[in-house]
Image (cartoon, coloured by chain):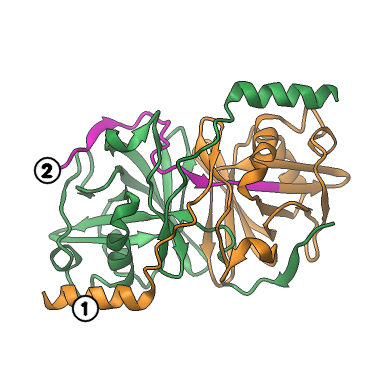
Chain colours: A green, B orange
Amino acid sequence: MSSLIFEPSSGKYYYHYPFPVAIVGVKAGEKVNFMSAAWHTQLSFDPPLYGVLISPKRYTNELLKQSSAFSVNFLKFEDYKTAGFVGRTSGRELDKVKTFGLKYFDGKVATVPVLENAIACYECKIVDSRTYGDHILYVGEILGIHYDKSYYENGLSKSLLLYHGNDRYTFANSESVKFGKEEVYDEINKNRKG
Amino acid sequence: MSSLIFEPSSGKYYYHYPFPVAIVGVKAGEKVNFMSAAWHTQLSFDPPLYGVLISPKRYTNELLKQSSAFSVNFLKFEDYKTAGFVGRTSGRELDKVKTFGLKYFDGKVATVPVLENAIACYECKIVDSRTYGDHILYVGEILGIHYDKSYYENGLSKSLLLYHGNDRYTFANSESVKFGKEEVYDEINKNRKG
């Protein structure tokens, strides 16, 4: 018996949260801006593509139209306030970098700002953009990656900032299960025989 | 000073993990299949659109071409083995439903299978598909939502299954910070004045 409740889609749905936070950085001329995005995903390994969803109303969208690149920055949980700040303000009204004292440096391979306190950052060249409903999917080819080794073990973060919805933030529990390929296949084979 | 290390993109990058796991369900004729996907995102509120990335090599892609809908199922952490099983096997070689004893029921508004042990499931009608590099983005309009009320508080899950990469799974810590809109704005105003 299922204990699932059904309802027609209301348009607002958060059942797939918590979700990692991506801080999208753009530099257009002298203007630098950052915004937090809860909608983003890897799209391809070869070429390495990463997609971020931006509302056409956002100031970031104006800058993206004048730029050929963006950065995708990931923060550690402790820096959740940065995500809250850049997510709830607009670069039209204030200079987020100055107002919140954000520190960044220029990208190595693309014209993008890289947050100094990021635990990882992807430098992306815009290769496509496409409107889906009320948002625009910007597709970036990842040209280079920055990461803070101290926050990753075998490439896997234990403190990545996740958005919980409603301005709340969380992070993944460090008690991760080591399911491992061998164990997966052992159990699959057991099930096959059973 | 930044402690970030730079390297050119290698094509394989997991610095944005852990990421929620989406179990994509498809029904084409009599065939029912589920696969786990680590690449997916919300795309739009109005209309409500959800996107999943599927490799053209996957059996799921064959079924999606014969279908007009898919389901996106989210599991609780305790059911991580289901994600491992359906992620590491192919519906071409075995019947995943039978082999792993998966229980599902038919969608209410779309021809999709809904996992009984999901904590949430989105029923999606395919409205677009587009190739990005080595994957295909299937765009689904969410027609209806199922959720297990006991796993959500104010719509926010505390036990959602996250993929950690390398066949490892984790979940978000329940000690979530209640940053809250009021607090965000209070601090933003403080920074504005400072």
Q: Position of residue B79 (x, y in %)?
A: 67, 43
Q: Is residue B31 magenta?
A: no
Circle 1 SS class: helix
Q: Chain of mark 2?
A: B
Viewer-nearest residue: A108 or A176: A176
Question: In the image, is residue B2 part of the stretch drawn in magenta?
Answer: yes
Labels 1 and 2 in the same subunit: yes
Expressed as whole percent of the image width and height from the top left, the position of residue A58 reads: 34, 70
- In the picture provided, is A185 more to the left or to the right than B188? right
Q: What is the number of the mark on residue A59? A: none
Residue at the spot x=71%, y=40% of the render?
B60
Q: Which residues are magenta?
A: B1-24
The location of residue B146, given as percent across then percent down, is 71, 64
User: Is residue B144 visible to us here?
Assistant: yes
- Tag 1: Cα neighbours inside 10 Å, few (<14), some, or many (≥20)? few
Given the image, on which type of amino acid does mark 2 rest? Met
Which residue is under mark 1? B189
Q: Position of residue B191 (x, y in %)?
A: 17, 72
Residue A112 appears anywhere in the view: no
Q: Residue at x 68, y 66 (%)?
A: B149
The residue under the point 52% across, 66% down is: B44
Q: For this view, does B46 lie left or right of residue A36?
A: right
Quadrant into which the N terminus of chain B falls:
top left
Tell me the quarter of the picture where residue B141 sits: bottom right
Q: Amino acid at mark 1?
A: Asn
Label 2 crowd bin: few (<14), some (14–19), many (20+), radius 10 Å:
few
Q: Nearer the viewer, residue A93 or A153?
A: A153
In the drawing, does residue A175 fall left or right of residue A78? Answer: right
